[in-house]
Amino acid sequence: MPLRLVLPPQAPETRPVLCVAVPPRMVGALIDTLRFVPECALPPLCGRVYKTSEKILVCLCIGEHVTRISQELEKLEPTGVAAAISTLFRTNDLVFEPERRNLGADWPIARPIREPTLSDFVFEGEHKSVATNLARVVGLALHALAAGKEFTASLIARGSTVLTTVGGKVCPTKLCVDACKRAKDLVAEWPEMKIRNTSEPSGTILDSLDHSVKACIAEGVSLASETQYLLTGLDVYTLWEPCIFCAMCLLHARVKRVFYLIQRPANGGLNETLMVPRIEGLNHRYSVMQGFPDEFAEPWSRVMELVTPSDDKKG
């Protein structure tokens, strides 16, 4: 079953850079002056020296200290590192003319940042168990749909071992496979009117309280309470992209990874912005992957046509 890693949009780095043009003979002395000053420390990926066709620029500082050091350097009697830099220029009969630039835009980053890939989060030997669990989710959801219930399902697992499921009263073993086969046949014969759009379009938090992800987390925490802390190290597999409320529940439960199949058209908490797993200051994060059930292509495409609103219907 194909997977893709879901990543948030990466905004360009816009941290301010304070730099100054110096002759080649002064580069070493200026770098030695800045080396042991905490305010002038640079991030690992940023270069201190930038050579252009016209001049050599040396970065003095980056980020929150730019404004303060710039103001200090403009004083008649600067202090601290500003005084050391000013003295260095005066003794060499040079005019200090600082420039402001933006990191990543017109100030270089020394080494390119490697983008994370799917293999960083799903190892080669895990693909079979991930595909199996996503197939179980499809089977549970189709079984629930065939029974006239909501088209949704979630399960919690470690590897191929399932802890608990929500969505259809079918165990995720051979019974799930059999139920999936029966449901596929039923769906292929159903008229459009019998398939309800139950994509959990949550409008309020109260609507979200009955979502399969939240219910699955509650059941899983209860079952795992005697052997581990919350759901640490466990994966959650779900049909629909969790809403923002469920994404917060996943965060609190300290799950390892989240796999889902269908992107939520509205109120999603993961796919569009990854707003929940990427909140700054969190002491836990989880990776997010979206799967595509190619082995269920025929019944899946029919179900998706009926439960997912088209662009014409949206307008």
Image: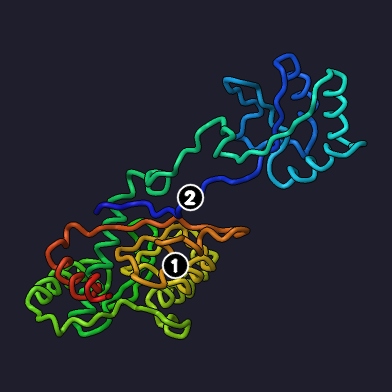
Residue 34 or residue 74, whichever sits in front: 74
Locate the N terminus and report the quarter of the image it occupies.
bottom left
Q: Residue beneath label 2, please?
A: 10
Near-viewer residue (55 or 203): 55
In the rendered image, the quadrant that contains the C terminus is: bottom left
Disc 2 residue type (three-letter): Gln
Which labelled disc corresponds to residue 190? none
* Residue at the image position 43 percent from the left and 53 percent from the top: 7
Crowd around label 1: few <14 · some 14–19 · many ≥20 (10 Å):
many
Which residue ends up furthest to the right in the rendered image?
77
The quarter holding residue 23 reads top right
Q: Which residue is mark 1?
A: 269
Q: Could you tell me residue 121's position as x and y percent?
A: 42, 48
Q: Is residue 157 visible?
A: yes
Packing grade of label 2 (10 A; few <14, some 14-19, many >=20) is few
At label 1, the amino acid type is Gly
Instruction: Kindly indicate the quadrant of the structure image that contains residue 235.
Output: bottom left
